[in-house]
Amino acid sequence: MCGVVGVVSKQPVNQLLYDALLLLQHRGQDAAGIVTEQNGETLYFDLDGKVHSEVIPGHLHSPCLFEYVYLARPDSSIDGVSVYEARLKMGNYLAKQIERVIDPKDIDVVMPIPDSSRPAAMQVALALGIDYRE
């Protein structure tokens, strides 16, 4: 059995995750661990309870785009930025890019694929005056 667990929380969850991994007691347990990152400091918690830390000087915080596009719930926020609002802005940006390369009149409909692209797709359709369909 294997898997990946992701947690988004305003509270520290390292100890909770560590305890949960110990309780699982499956054969792949020895390959598990916890990695967190905040403000340029990466912490790795191994299953022996040891904490390894690495600080990256001059670290530029750059959240993963896939978090905003695919993974995050629309009602969540990442680093104080509303995921839903970010997706709307992505739709506006995409609409501007489309207008630069193609006449919007040549587009029949805008459809969201995957489902998490609904806000961006709705914004593209609105900005370009094109029908939105699911």
Image (cartoon, grey):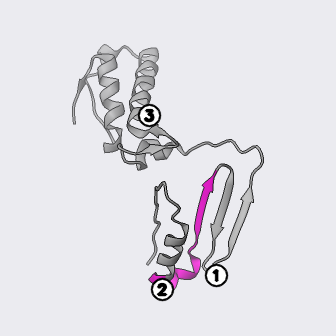
Given contact means CB atoms under 8 Å apart, are the residues at marks 1 and 3 in contact? no
* x 31%, y 44%: residue: 115
Q: Which mark is residue 86?
A: 3
User: Which amino acid type is shown beneath numbered disc 3?
Assistant: Ala
* x 34%, y 18%: residue: 127
Given contact means CB atoms under 8 Å apart, are the residues at marks 2 and 1 in contact? no
> Which residues fall within the magenta stretch?
23-38
Q: Which mark is residue 48?
A: 1
Q: Nearer the viewer, residue 18 or 128?
A: 18
Q: Residues within 10 Å of mark 1 (few under 14, many from 20)?
A: few
Q: Position of residue 117 (x, y in %)?
A: 35, 38
Instruction: Determine the CA span between mark 2 and mark 1.
Output: 13 Å
Q: Earlier in the sequence, mark 2 or mark 1?
A: 2
Relative to 109, does residue 69 appear above or below in the rendering?
Answer: below
Quadrant location, the N terminus: bottom left
Q: Nearer the viewer, residue 126 or 42?
A: 42
Residue of label 2: 25
Q: Position of residue 22 (x, y in %)?
A: 51, 82
Given contact means CB atoms under 8 Å apart, are the residues at marks 2 and 3 in contact? no
The kind of secondary structure element at disc 2 is loop
* x 44%, y 18%: residue: 96
Q: Which quarter of the figure has residue 33?
A: bottom right
Quadrant location, the C terminus: top left
Q: Earlier in the sequence, mark 1 or mark 3?
A: 1
